[in-house]
Image (spheres, rainbow, N blue to C red):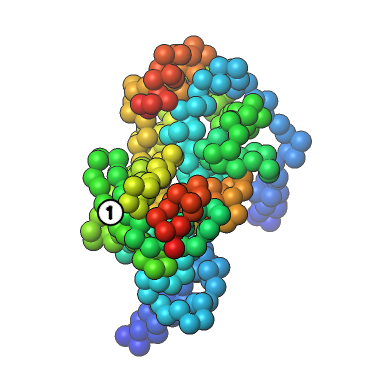
Amino acid sequence: MKSSIVLVASIVACSVPDPNARTVIAGPDRSQFDLVQPFMENSCGSLDCHGSRYRNLKIYGYEGLRLDPGDIPGGNPTSTAEIDATYDSIVNLEPEIMNEVVADHGADPERLTIVRKARGTESHAGGAVLAIGGNGDRCFTSWLASSLDDAACHLAQSSP
Amino acid sequence: MVKLFVAWLAFAVACSLDPVHDEAVADLGPEEAGVPEGPLHRPDQPCLVCHADMSVAGTIHAAPDGPAPIANVVVTLTDARGSQATATTNAAGNFFVEKSAWAPTYPLHATIALGSVNAIMNTEIGRDGSCASCHVAPASRISAGLVFLAPTVALLPDGGT
């Protein structure tokens, strides 16, 4: 009897995730992200931070990490492909949670690690980059809520 | 019991507890022949990998068309709270600021100047005080290239020599 229990327990313990399982991303609006990207480039995308290819969150753009192998920091303006790549990096960090936050119209955004770290409520090597309720914070969280605060996003480019 | 503890302690000290750091140090390679350890050694390497007592350090070059390291360049660093530090490059183009003198709050902004010639770093330094962590030659999609004072040596006093 005991050996049967052990056998069942070991089978359950050894089960593996379904390799064909997929999470369908229903992230925030891609087109609105065009206004979010600029301040994130400035505030988060330096080469020693999220402009590093070694970070899970990678921010591409003019002043930092480039997508095109022929491009350099400070070279061509940020391309649409780079904005796409940054968007993909953000929404794929925690896809299931991202889906939930977007479905909840941006409620409780600190479910997302990116928000906790940016606000400094979770340990972040770059410190508290965005003050809660500040321009960058309002820009990012309004984007999560699918009701982009354009003015905050513009202001965040010079004063995040 | 004491012997056992001493043996364990010796083992712990002998074995690195940070293999990532060890690998980063090993990647720097050996000292250049003829250059002793000191302020002139290892230009263009990420200083803070080894120099944990430094807050910011790096190497400045003259210009892309005359990329020799350049001395007497004043580096001015400003942190997120407005606190400033300055350092001057030596004969190897190296400069450094020690933590005991300045422990900045990131992000930082940097300017470099020699006489009337100056350059301003457009981007913020987000977290890494080693210039060479990002500034390596050649410029590429992951690097801004070396730090140059001027776009051409013709703009420098004495042609940057």
- The secondary element bearing badge 1 is classed as strand
Q: Is residue A113 visible?
A: no
The residue nearer to you, when weighing A81 against B114, is B114
In the picture, measured across the screen, residue B71 lies left or right of residue A30, that is left
Q: Residue furthest top?
A: A147
Above or below, A72 against B15 in this view is: above
- On screen, residue B139 versus residue A4, left or right, reads left
* Residue drawn at (25%, 40%) of the image: B81
User: Label 1: which residue?
Assistant: B86
A101 or B52, which lies in front?
A: B52
Quarter assignment of residue B136: bottom right
Q: Is residue A135 above or below residue A46?
A: above
Q: How many marks?
A: 1
Instruction: Give coordinates of residue B116: x percent, y percent.
Output: 34, 47
Q: Is residue B89 above or below residue A31?
A: below
Q: Is residue A118 visible?
A: yes
Chain for disc number 1: B
Q: Residue at x 48, y 82 (%)?
A: B34
Q: Quadrant of the C terminus of chain A?
A: top left
Q: Position of residue A3 (x, y in %)?
A: 68, 56
Q: Where residue A29 sits in the image (x, y, percent)? A: 59, 17
- Residue drawn at point x = 51 percent, y = 50 percent: B152
Q: Label 1 amino acid?
A: Thr
Q: Is residue A47 above or below residue B35?
A: above
